[in-house]
Amino acid sequence: MSDPTAVNLSPSDRDILRIVGKSWGWVLFFGVVTLGLGIVVTLHPKDTIYAFAVVVGIWLFVAGLFRIILAIADSEDTGGERWLTALLGLVSVVIGILVLHHTDETITTLAFLLGLFWVIGGIIEFFTAYSDRGAPARVWRIAMGVLAFAAGVVTLVWPHLTVNALAVIIGIWLIIYGLLELVLSLQLRKLASI
């Protein structure tokens, strides 16, 4: 990043850069949290996936309760809208309870759905790219279709292995992102002294 003090800046531009620069502590905090989360996810992928499924189950349960309460308390909507909101809330509560009660099956089901999506998406991508002979990046689209299909097959055959591998990839991505946030915070800190 070039030195902003070497550039002719108006007083209002300098004020804006100082304000942005003063937020460096928040960016540093976010970077440290992201880095820490990435390390935890990478070192404990199975526990992370399980915790994620539990959080989703709790979220579905609480969101469903909120919709039921909203349907009861809302006197402005028609009876049909209130019943539909309450029904959606009830479905959300039931699915939340099922997710919390059958967490391992939920993870396997999500892996199955992801694998199925990749298989179907890979086939569609391959055939649309193959049939469109004049398309730019046709070879890349064909390769991506084959790759998605292969990833889908692996996911369907070994769902737990695939979900763990995805968690590790996400963890590594979080580590890299956290490190980039740390570097950005140091750059922002320089702006505060303009």
Image (tube, rainbow, N blue to C red):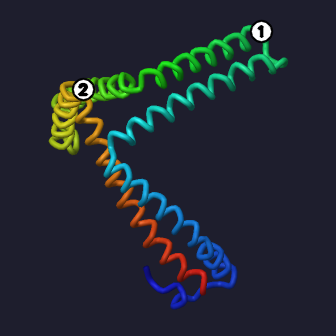
Q: Quadrant of residue 164?
A: top left
Q: Secondary structure at mark 2?
A: helix
Callout 1: 10 Å neighbours few (<14), some, many (20+)?
Answer: few
Residue in the picture at 57% in, 15% down: 91
Q: Nearer the viewer, residue 173 or 188?
A: 173
x and y, in percent, of residue 11 in the image: 68, 84
The residue that disc 1 covers is 79
Does residue 182 sit above or below 149 in this rendering? below
Question: Would residue 183 appear left or right of 68 to someone viewing this image?
Answer: left
x and y, in percent, of residue 80 in the image: 73, 8
Q: Secondary structure at mark 1?
A: helix
Q: Amino acid at mark 2?
A: Ile
Sequence-first disc among 1 and 2:
1
Callout 2: 10 Å neighbours few (<14), some, many (20+)?
Answer: some
Question: Would residue 80 appear left or right of 186 to someone viewing this image?
Answer: right
Q: Nearer the viewer, residue 93 or 184?
A: 93
x and y, in percent, of residue 50 in the image: 40, 35
Q: Is residue 153 visible?
A: yes
Residue in the picture at 61% in, 72% down: 20
Q: Quadrant of residue 77?
A: top right
The residue that disc 2 covers is 124
**Quadrant where the N terminus lies?**
bottom left
Q: Quadrant of residue 124?
A: top left
In the image, which disc is placed on residue 91? none
- Mark whose residue sits in front, 1 or 2: 1
Q: CA distance from mark 1 to mark 2?
A: 43 Å
Q: Nearer the viewer, residue 78 or 133?
A: 78
Q: Are marks 1 and 2 in contact (CB under 8 Å)?
A: no
Does residue 165 sit above or below 35 in this rendering? above
Q: Amino acid at mark 1?
A: Gly
